[in-house]
Amino acid sequence: MLEIKTIDESPAASDYIFIFVKDNAVISLQRPPDQFWLRGEVEGAFGDVGVGAPLGYWAGRPSYAIEVDAQCLNVMEHMSGSLYSLFGRVSDVIFAAYGRALQMLAWQRDHQFCGRCGTLTAPTDGGKALACVDCGHSAYPRLNPCVIVAVGRGEQLLLATAAGRATGFHSTLAGFIEPGESAEQAVIREVQEEVGIGVNNVRYFTSQPWPFPSQLMLGFFADHSDGEIVIDPTEIAHADWYGRDDLPTVPPPQSIAGQLIHHFFATR
Ligand SMILES: [Zn+2]
């Protein structure tokens, strides 16, 4: 897996490189997905690509993310696709590494200029931050914490489809944590807002990085306490209680939603 730590050596031809064209990961069609590019190969194929965004170490080797020009890609040798298209197709550790790579690239791209005074920024703190060369204001990669919650009522689980997003799944409810709010408070508020019911007994399950684009999903279970389902149609297209034997199509087990749903019924 990708070991997240500061790279304390100079860029070298033997560095591992995760390549992207805009937000699309580039996968070689001629080698397995865990045989990453080497910096020397990338420079041979694409010319000067810069140092890239530092990721940490893969198998003891410094690793970086680099964006290349689509016009330089040989389509006979490479395939580029959204990060989501890799989900479930490569191992979890490779997916997590690509997820970090995409987020670090996006952070570098979006913080080239100081948000406070507009001057150029430069890497600082071992590449972990970008700091303004004038006023010193620094920006670290931003994560957006979200709660995702499986609400139970006896043997039944609340599942919903999101408005305006045709995922084909019935899933657990999720939402961003607001400034000044605890994760548990966000669970109670999101459920109330989206489906109009009260919950209690909120308990933490596990977490998952969700790089679409930069969420950290915090998974919870909660129990229905009061009220009937009244959906907010701007957020939810359909919501209902489901038992183990009448489950609709749910998210895959690689996702935290899939894990919450599986765990709910496995412990009933
Ligand atoms: Zn500044």
Image (cartoon, rainbow, N blue to C red):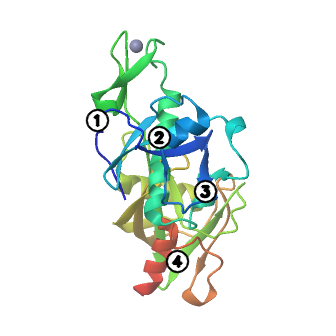
Task: Answer left or right for 110 relative to 180.
Answer: right
Residue under pointer 4:
157
Picture coordinates of residue 199, whole percent (x, y):
43, 66
Picture coordinates of residue 30, whole percent (x, y):
62, 59
> Residue type at mark 2?
Arg
- Disc 4 crowd, CA 10 A, few/some/many (<14, 14-19, 20+): many
Measured in 3D between alpha carbons, the distance from the residue under mark 4 to the one under mark 1, in whole angstroms, is 51 Å
> Residue type at mark 1?
Glu
- Disc 1 crowd, CA 10 A, few/some/many (<14, 14-19, 20+): few
Secondary structure beneath dot 1 equals: loop
Q: First in sequence: mark 2 or mark 4?
A: 2
Tag 3–tag 2 contact (CB < 8 Å): no
Picture coordinates of residue 246, whole percent (x, y):
63, 86
Q: Nearer the viewer, mark 4 or mark 1?
A: 1
Q: First in sequence: mark 3 or mark 2?
A: 2
Residue under pointer 3:
84
Measured in 3D between alpha carbons, the distance from the residue under mark 3 to the one under mark 4, in whole angstroms, is 26 Å
Q: Which residue appears at 44% of the width and 31% of the height? A: 51
